[in-house]
């Protein structure tokens, strides 16, 4: 059965409305007054009755709680260290990373970062809104923390507890495959950090900083991924290996 | 060493220019006239010399071929059957699916598809442009084929040769995890088809059609992914299991 979603908590007897997108779906499915529908919140699933339909607005009343939502258990944390990029690219990166469900995002400036740090910080309100909207849309019970922007070398004290540290790299440095790094490790229980450089890559100095912080370098096979795509691809794979997708 | 990219073939002695994005990178790195740089095309890597810099335009001359590009070998094909969505969402889906590298895309209309088939078909020029641009950007040597739009039941003759058929589902139907489906199968050698329904899900009729075509149903753990995100997440995982990422 299709479950409509209401992004705030409900209790029995509450009157609420389906979101626009859910209303379109409901109308397409031929919803009628007095129909019984299932509505999901962050924490619970409720049985509701349709009390009014006017235009595209569908009003429901909460009848009873059916169950608590099954929320996937999470193992170790997943932190993404991401070099800042344009508003559009970073926005898209944030949206997708919230959907797949990472723990923490640390935006960084490295030597070849093309974007301006000040322009990036001006958008803090926008980043928070994107995270909030994507959290609602994806019904993510564990939205990520967005840290303040920092330099690459300053991240060390923000990621102290992580045993698996991966830096994506196309540079001339000793690299492993993702399979090599994720095999024979406690991927499920370990905190993992993934560092993704700017489109222009890491500098020799950046690579030294990463090595000192015990990052292992991964070169992806296949096509060149855009900087805003890489984190989602890697996170999907890590979540799959952990059994969280 | 950072490799600049020119999305057409080159031969020794050719004069060409770096793309805008690559020029920004090069200028950031302090490129100078007479510097030697590496330039990659679809098939080869060349050593080039910088012959002119005026404003943001960087002219290079091709000196010699260093090597043929290593192109990741691909196993079985990966076909995505995707219910059509809005221009923005379908465009984003296409762009990402080209980057990760799928073989074929079949857009479909199923019972609860909200989008209009005619509006979708009007955009054929746009879809081709997105595929072309993403193919260039991601240096994808195997761009996907975009089939004509069809109904769900009409896809059967377009995917005859595939042994592993997966339909994403949140509906009340017997589902497996991706791990269960991808384990103990010849994932590398088999042609795989993944079907992704509209935001409003599959209807009971759609589910029957899929069952008749031997699709297995997968319910993803974790958050609800947007329809334009799902294909990239699944494709990333399949490519990882195949050793192609």
Image (tube, coloured by chain):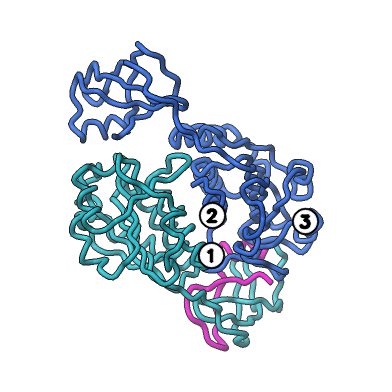
Chain colours: A blue, B cyan
Residue B245's disc number: 1
Q: Residues within 10 Å of mark 3 (few under 14, many from 20)?
A: some
In magenta, the rendered stretch is B1-28
Residue B175's disc number: none
Q: Is residue A181 above or below residue A29?
A: below
Q: Is residue A102 above or below residue B156?
A: above
Q: Position of residue B36 (x, y in %)?
A: 69, 78
| Residue B219 is covered by the magenta coloring | no
Residue A237's disc number: 2
How far is disc 2 from disc 3 in space, using C-alphas? 21 Å
Q: Residues within 10 Å of mark 2 (few under 14, many from 20)?
A: many
How far is disc 2 from disc 1 in space, using C-alphas? 10 Å
Which residue was labeled with disc 3? A214
The subunit letter for the residue under badge 3 reads A
The subunit letter for the residue under badge 1 reads B
Q: Nearer the viewer, residue B69 or B118?
A: B69
Quick check: marks 2 and 1 in contact, CB under 8 Å?
yes
Question: To which quarter of the image does residue B94 belong?
Answer: bottom left
In the picture provided, is B209 more to the left or to the right than A39? left
Q: Position of residue A126 (x, y in %)?
A: 55, 35
In the picture provided, is A8 more to the left or to the right than B147? right
Q: Residue at x 33, y 32 (%)?
A: A3
- Helix, strand or loop at mark 1: loop
Q: Residue at x 69, y 37 (%)?
A: A148
Q: Are marks 2 and 3 on the same chain?
A: yes
In the picture provided, is A17 more to the left or to the right than B46? left
Q: Nearer the viewer, residue B45 or B101?
A: B101
């Amino acid at each position: 059965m299709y479950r409509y979603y209401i992004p705030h908590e409900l209790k029995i007897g509450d009157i609420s409305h389906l979101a626009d997108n859910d209303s379109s779906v409901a109308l397409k499915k031929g919803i009628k007054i007095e129909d019984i529908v299932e509505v999901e919140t962050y924490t619970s699933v409720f049985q509701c009755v349709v009390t009014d339909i006017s235009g595209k607005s569908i009003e429901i009343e909460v009848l009873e709680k059916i169950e608590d939502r099954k929320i996937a258990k999470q193992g170790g944390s997943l932190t993404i260290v991401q070099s800042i990029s344009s508003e559009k690219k970073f926005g898209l990166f944030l949206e997708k990373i919230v959907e797949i469900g990472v723990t923490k995002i640390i935006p960084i400036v490295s030597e070849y970062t093309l974007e301006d740090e000040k322009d990036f910080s001006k958008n803090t309100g926008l980043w928070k809104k994107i995270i909030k909207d994507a959290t609602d849309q994806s019904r993510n019970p564990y939205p990520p923390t967005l840290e303040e922007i920092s330099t690459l070398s300053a991240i060390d004290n923000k990621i102290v507890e992580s045993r698996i540290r991966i830096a994506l790299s196309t540079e001339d440095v000793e690299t492993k495959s993702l399979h090599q790094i994720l095999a024979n490790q406690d991927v499920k229980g370990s905190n993992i950090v993934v560092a993704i450089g700017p489109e222009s890559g890491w500098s020799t100095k950046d690579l030294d900083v990463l090595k000192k912080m015990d990052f292992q370098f991964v070169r992806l096979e296949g096509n060149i991924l855009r900087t805003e795509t890489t984190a989602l691809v890697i996170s999907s794979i890590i979540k799959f290996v952990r059994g969280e997708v």
